């Protein structure tokens, strides 16, 4: 509930900012605000065998020319997985939970290709900064008591290039709907043990599928 309220408030704030910028610059319909949701590819080394998370996105765009648009995007990613194993002949059990949270920031250059008055095809490329936090807890219960309770937490980050394509349909002069496919490929770094000096790194690649609404000002 709190996440939804915060996200809605952020959209309202971004839309207000876009209106102010549009009025100040006189740039009729050159500024846009978009809200989206979809899937995010959590690194398989962390999320196997469930490598996709729900993500929400907020985008502010500026139309550089008739065909080029510059987009800045903020995302919120939330993923968790729970597993439990029960003993066959006793009441003993063991469970574990792993959570992954990320707030990527992306910058993209988008090439817009109108098909007709209603539909527009677009291609994009850019780069994003993806900070993340992973928290894992494992509990083993024997005879009704937790004999083992381990919690680990580590932070990481990655600079990840991306390419994308999508289709946008006009609903009115200022409102449109869009769907987008984005391919991510880059290197993520993290410290599995916080007190150890060296970092572990791995390549993360995957596809984002998202849909959203865009407002033009």
Image: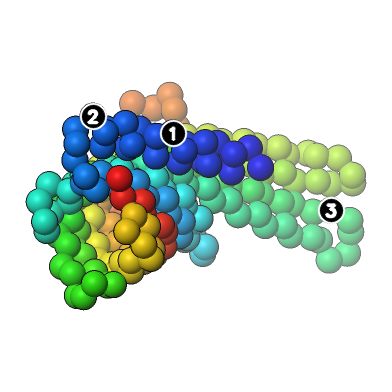
Give how far across and how far down residue 194 sits, in percent: 44, 28
Which label's residue is closer to the chain start, 1 or 2? 1
Q: In front here: 21 or 48?
A: 21
Circle nearer the viewer, 2 or 3: 2
Discs 3, 1 touching: Cβ within 8 Å: no
Q: Identify which residue is drawn at 23% across, 29% down.
A: 24
Measure how far apart labels 1 and 2 are at the Cα level. Answer: 16 Å
Residue carrying label 3: 92
As drawn, the label of residue 13 is 1
Q: Quadrant of the C terminus?
A: top left
Q: CA distance from mark 3 to mark 1?
A: 51 Å
Image quadrant in which the N terminus is located: top right
Q: Judging from the image, what secondary structure is the residue with disc 3 in?
A: loop
* Residue neighbourhood size for the residue with mark 2, other residues' Cα within 10 Å, grouped as few (<14), some (14–19), many (≥20): few
Residue at horizontal 37 percent and vertical 57 percent from the top: 175
Residue drawn 42% across and 50% down?
A: 35
Up the image or down, 113 lies above or below 16; here it is: below
74 and 44: which one is in front?
74
């Amino acid at each position: 509930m709190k996440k939804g309220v915060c996200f809605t408030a952020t959209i309202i704030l971004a839309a207000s900012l876009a209106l102010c910028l549009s009025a100040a610059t006189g740039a009729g319909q050159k500024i846009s605000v978009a809200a989206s949701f979809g899937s995010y590819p959590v690194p398989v080394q962390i999320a196997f065998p469930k490598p996709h998370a729900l993500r929400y996105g907020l985008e502010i765009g500026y139309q550089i020319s008739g065909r080029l648009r510059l987009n800045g995007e903020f995302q919120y990613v939330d993923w968790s997985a729970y597993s439990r194993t029960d003993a066959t002949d006793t009441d003993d059990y063991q469970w574990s939970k792993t959570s992954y949270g990320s707030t990527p920031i992306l910058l993209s250059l988008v090439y817009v290709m109108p098909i007709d008055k209603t539909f527009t095809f677009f291609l994009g490329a850019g780069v994003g900064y993806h900070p993340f936090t992973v928290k894992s807890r494992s509990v083993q219960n024997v005879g009704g008591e937790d004999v083992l309770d381990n919690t680990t937490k580590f932070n990481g980050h990655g600079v990840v290039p991306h390419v994308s394509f999508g289709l946008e349909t006009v609903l009115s002069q200022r409102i449109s709907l869009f769907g987008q496919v984005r391919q991510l490929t880059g290197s993520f770094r993290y410290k599995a043990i916080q007190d150890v000096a060296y970092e572990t790194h791995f390549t993360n690649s995957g596809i984002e599928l998202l849909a959203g609404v865009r407002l033009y000002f």
